[in-house]
Image (tube, rainbow, N blue to C red):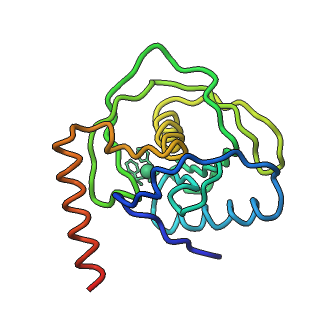
Amino acid sequence: MALLPILCYPDPRLHTVAKPVAAVDDRIRTLVADMLDTMYDAKGIGLAATQIDVHERVIVIDVSEERDDPIVLINPELVWTSPGTHLNEEGCLSVPGIYDGVERFDAVHVRAMDLAGQVRTIEAEELLAVCIQHEMDHLMGKVFVEYLSPLKRNRIKTKLRKAQREDAR
Ligand code: K1U
Ligand code: ZN
């Protein structure tokens, strides 16, 4: 088991655009296992490789109550989005203690490789659809607070920088 440090907003590395994975090999399988350990340990429902400073298109998700149904998305692509959207209250392991509303598609279809290198299409709604959109934003270098007003975002930056300075003491 390996727990990886999670980058904290406003770390500029969170704005890196991830590159496609070239091959699903042992390096990627180890990365996915470490990401799942890290996500479960942090009590998150998702984690993008960007958040652990690996800039490749890999996402892990588990929205199950029992925390026993991991989903691995390698090189994910949104292939369909619903006409309807809704405002969803979101958090982020890279923005600790901050929760706010983000407008998301009600449902999405995502095509991605699994750990066996098989391409699959997942039809997602509710929390899974929201989580997929949130994690795919991470791969594009976007953090959910960038949907908020500049005033709110600056307050969050100031608060988290202060907390990080105090943690470093
Ligand atoms: O990407 C991340 O930082 C993980 C993030 C995923 C996420 C949560 C909520 C909405 C969209 C995406 C988290 O897991 S935040 C912490 C959390 O466990 C949680 C927060 C709200 C609802 C359910 C879970
Ligand atoms: Zn996040």
Is residue 143 positioned above or below 40 on the image? above
* Percent position of residue 92, x then y: 39, 53
Q: Quadrant of residue 50?
A: bottom right
**Image quadrant for the N terminus?**
bottom right
Return the x and y of residue 94 as percentages of the image width and height: 40, 58
The residue that appears at 46% across and 41% down in the rendered structure is 134
Task: Give the left or right position of residue 117, taking residue 48 as reference.
Answer: right
Which residue is outermost to the top? 83
- Say above or below: 101 vs 83: below
Taking depth in this image into account, of 107 and 111 the one nearest to the observer is 111
The spot of residue 86 in percent (x, y) is: 35, 25
Q: Is residue 97 left or right of residue 109?
A: left
Tally of marks:
0
| In this picture, residue 163 sits left or right of residue 82 | left
156 left or right of 11 in image: left
Look at the image and tell me in which quarter the C terminus lies: bottom left
| Residue 74 x %, y % | 70, 45
Out of 53 and 136, give the one closest to the viewer: 53
Q: Residue at x 48, y 46 (%)?
A: 141
Q: Residue at x 50, y 17 (%)?
A: 82
Q: Quadrant of residue 159?
A: bottom left
